Amino acid sequence: MELKEAIWKRKTSNNAFLEKEVSLEHIQEIILAANRAPSHFNSQPWDFIIITDPQFREKIGKIAGFSMEKLMEKGEFFERYRRYFRFSKEEINDFKSGIYIDKIPFLLQPFVKFLTGENGKSVLNFFGVPKILGKDAERIVSTSPLLLGLLLKKEEYKPWQKSGIYSLISMGAALQNIWLTATSLGMGLQFVSTPMEIDSEWKKITELLKVPDSHELMAVYRLGYSNDSIKRNTIDWVSDERKTIEDLISWNYFGNKMK
């Protein structure tokens, strides 16, 4: 696959992957691509943990599912990120950003308009949405053939110094290399984000992976081979919408748009 094609095909994989082990050759190709990313003074501030053991994946899956359910039950997750949620084609077309929640259980569809109001959390809990999302999160994480932990070395990652910013930029470049390489190999990725929203749950993953004091666990991703025929989650979304080049560019100074 050419680079341009991989860029355009890259997307977040919300659903399960094929029940197929990721080959060692592909793992090596992905990590070597990550390490070709630019880093300040060629510091290469990253390390990676490849998680293939089913018991480890199951434990992380349970943590991910529990975190998702609790965040949705309390309403924190929904309130924090509501500005990114779109519930209609008109809304996603107007914003040209965010995620379009296009797959919603039939019984919940008439109540979607209430989700943005004061009773939004109550509606979600009444229809059992937290449990649905938690169950799906646990399943897709646990059954992913590979989980990938991204770590930064604390000697480089110092958030209060410029090196901290440089390290984050480097990690982003490494992640993009991972994502594009995986896409070219017919694989998908998804950020296992919800445990990071609850400190105690993220600590469990950090301890499970035996992350040393010299490193900071920055993120966990799930990887696997994709197939469009795989059944979608009970509640699912797409994030294909993008802003136009006219929306993105100012010429010479901010706000100066091409006539």
Image (cartoon, helix red, strand yellow):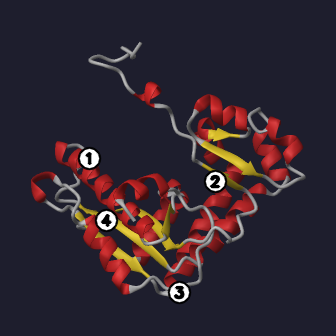
Q: Is residue 79 visible?
A: no
Give the CA distance from mark 3 to mark 4: 21 Å
Q: Where is residue 123 drawn, in percent x and y?
A: 82, 45
Tell me the SS state at disc 3: helix
The three-letter amino acid code for the residue at tag 1 is: Pro
Residue drawn at point x = 23 percent, y = 59 percent: 37
Residue drawn at point x = 86 percent, y = 41 percent: 111
Q: Nearer the viewer, residue 259 or 163?
A: 259
Q: Nearer the viewer, residue 74 or 217?
A: 217
Which residue position holds label 4? 151
Which residue position holds label 2? 71
Q: Earlier in the sequence, mark 2 or mark 3?
A: 3
Q: Are marks 1 and 3 in contact (CB under 8 Å)?
A: no
The three-letter amino acid code for the residue at tag 3 is: Gln
Above or below: residue 183 compared with residue 25: above
Q: Earlier in the sequence, mark 1 or mark 3?
A: 3
Which residue position holds label 3? 55
Q: Earlier in the sequence, mark 2 or mark 1?
A: 2
Quadrant including the C terminus: top left
Mark 2 or mark 3, whichever is nearer to me: 3
Which numbered marker is on residue 159? 1
Q: Where is residue 54 drawn, in percent x and y?
A: 53, 86
The three-letter amino acid code for the residue at tag 2 is: Leu
